[in-house]
């Protein structure tokens, strides 16, 4: 369903912050209840904002890909430093 749920779980605080900027009507308690589960989060966003599954999936994948790229860049930099 979603591009990389591992990105969501591995960078939950950062991803949550990005999602909160997009969907500010969702409370912290609601975000925390979803506990980083992409399917639960998607359902929450759909319910609160009346978006289709495809719309939510597109937004989530965009967010996940940005955080995936950041994580990949950090890993690459760490590998370079380790080799020296």
Image (cartoon, rainbow, N blue to C red):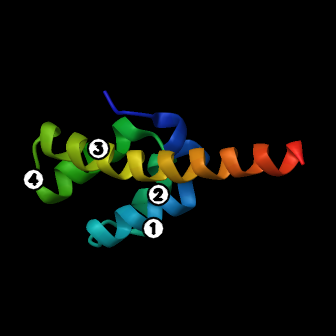
Mark 3 or 2, closer to the camera: 2
At x 29%, y 72%, the residue is 24
Residue assigned mark 3: 42
* First in sequence: mark 3 vs mark 2: 2
Contact between labelled residues 2 and 4, with CB atoms less than 8 Å apart: no
Contact between labelled residues 4 and 1, with CB atoms less than 8 Å apart: no
Spatial separation of the CA atoms under disc 3 and disc 2: 13 Å
How busy is the neighbourhood of tag 2: few (under 14 within 10 Å), some, or many (20 plus)? Answer: some
Locate residue 59, reporting x and y percent.
24, 50
Contact between labelled residues 1 and 2, with CB atoms less than 8 Å apart: yes
Locate residue 53, reporting x and y percent.
16, 38
- Secondary structure at numbered mark 3: helix
Residue in the foreground of this view, choosing between 83 and 64: 83
Residue assigned mark 4: 50
Residue assigned mark 2: 15
Contact between labelled residues 1 and 3, with CB atoms less than 8 Å apart: no
Q: Is residue 79 above or below residue 17?
A: above
């Amino acid at each position: 369903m979603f591009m990389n749920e591992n990105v969501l779980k591995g960078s939950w605080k950062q991803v949550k912050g990005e999602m909160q900027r997009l969907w500010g009507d969702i409370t912290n308690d609601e975000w925390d209840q979803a506990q980083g589960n992409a399917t639960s989060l998607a359902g929450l966003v759909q319910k609160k904002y009346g978006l289709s599954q495809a719309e939510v999936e597109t937004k989530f994948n965009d967010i996940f890909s940005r955080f995936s790229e950041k994580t990949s860049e950090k890993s690459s930099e760490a590998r370079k430093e380790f080799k020296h």
